[in-house]
Structures are given as C-alpha cells and as structure tokens.
Image (cartoon, helix red, strand yellow):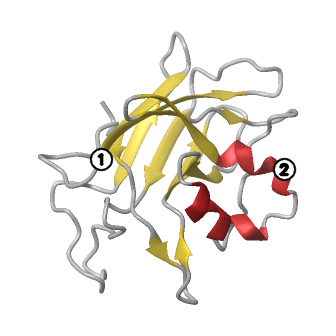
C-alpha cells in the first residue's frame, strides 16, 4: 500500500472510494500506471500549516498514491468527498481532486482534475471548467457515481475519450 487510503482515523464528511483505469491510445489498460492525488478535506481545507480559513481534518492526509493493479490496471483511493475551495478572485471552485499520472512511455507526469458528476451546479460555476474551450470534453473530467459512495474515473491518454490534461 503506497497510500491509497487518505484516512488515518475517523474523518469528517462523506467517505468515498474512487476507482479507475488508465487506458492508452488503443484502449489497453496500463497496468504499470501510478496515480497520485491531492485534495482538500470535506470542508474544503488543506492539511497545511499555511491554511488560513480554519483547521483541516487531522485524520485526513489530503494526499494519496495508488499503483494500477498488475492484473487489471485498476487504481483505487479511499478518501472523502472534497469540499469547495476558493479561487484567487474569491469565486468558489467546484469540489475536485488534483491527479498526477505517470507510467512507461510518459516522459513528464500528466496533470488533470477529478470533478464529480453529481455536483452540476458547482461544476457550472467553476472558474476552471468555464475556461475550457471545448466544453463538450468536460465529461472527461467527471467521476461517475457507480454505487453508494463509489465513483469511477477512467483516464484515457489518447483517442475520442481523451481526458483533459492541464499544463501546470
């Protein structure tokens, strides 16, 4: 376990599981992919000494790492549904998780975000999502609810379902 659980004790908020697979351009799962995620707690606070809006949940790390399963390529995170966080201009960003992807053939790690399909109002007001030129591709950033507190977020490196990646 390289950090797939971001909980160190009882956490505040809704506990969720995020599952997914990284697919290459042919639709083949990458079994050697590594995903890292960073996120705020359920109140939108980061576990940092620099957090000025309050104290983050002490039982939540805010960071996780999950390798793809060597048989299926599936990664899994046990975390909490993040709260909204302020954008520098004061607008609120929709609940999201930042993800970093590395694997063979990827020379520089890829950055993306995981938003939640069951947050349509927050997503429509999000200052990052509203800047995306090709709005028809936003669904590639939405985790889909597949069960009670379980979300699916597959990452496609190329092709018609290619995930939006950010140049950060």
Q: Which quarter of the rendering shows the N terminus?
A: top left
Residue at screen point 73% across, 17% down? 28
User: In terms of image quadrants, where is residue 161?
Assistant: top right
The numbered disc on residue 3 is none
On the question of residue 3 being in view, the answer is: yes
The CA span between labels 1 and 2 is 29 Å
Which callout, 1 or 2, points at the residue further toward the start of the chain? 1
The numbered disc on residue 136 is 2
Height in image: 142 above or below 98? above
Residue at screen point 57% across, 41% down? 143
The numbered disc on residue 14 is 1
On the image, the x and y values in percent for residue 128 come to 67, 69
Mark 2: few, some, or many residues within 10 Å (few <14, many ≥20)? few
The residue tagged with tag 1: helix, strand or loop?
Answer: loop
Residue at screen point 52% across, 88% down? 90
Q: Nearer the viewer, residue 81 or 160?
A: 81
150 lies left or right of 92: left
147 lies left or right of 105: left
Residue at screen point 64% across, 70% down? 125
Q: Which quarter of the rendering shows the C terminus?
A: bottom right
The residue tagged with tag 2: helix, strand or loop?
Answer: helix
Q: Nearer the viewer, residue 121 or 31?
A: 121
On the image, the x and y values in percent for residue 105 come to 73, 34
């Amino acid at each position: 376990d390289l950090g797939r659980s971001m909980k160190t004790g009882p956490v505040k908020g809704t506990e969720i599981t995020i599952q997914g697979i990284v697919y290459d351009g042919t639709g083949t799962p990458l079994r050697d992919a590594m995903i890292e995620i960073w996120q705020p707690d359920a109140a939108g606070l980061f576990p940092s000494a620099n957090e000025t809006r309050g104290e983050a949940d002490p039982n939540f790390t805010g960071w996780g790492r999950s390798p793809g399963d060597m048989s299926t390529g599936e990664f899994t995170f046990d975390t909490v549904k993040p709260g909204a966080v302020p954008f520098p201009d004061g607008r609120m960003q929709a609940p999201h998780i930042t993800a970093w992807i590395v694997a063979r053939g990827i020379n520089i790690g890829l950055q993306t975000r995981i938003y939640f399909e069951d947050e349509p109002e927050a997503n429509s007001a999000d200052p990052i999502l509203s800047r995306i030129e090709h709005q028809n591709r936003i669904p590639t950033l939405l985790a889909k609810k597949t069960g009670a507190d379980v979300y699916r977020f597959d990452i496609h490196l190329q092709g018609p379902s290619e995930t939006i990646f950010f140049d950060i």
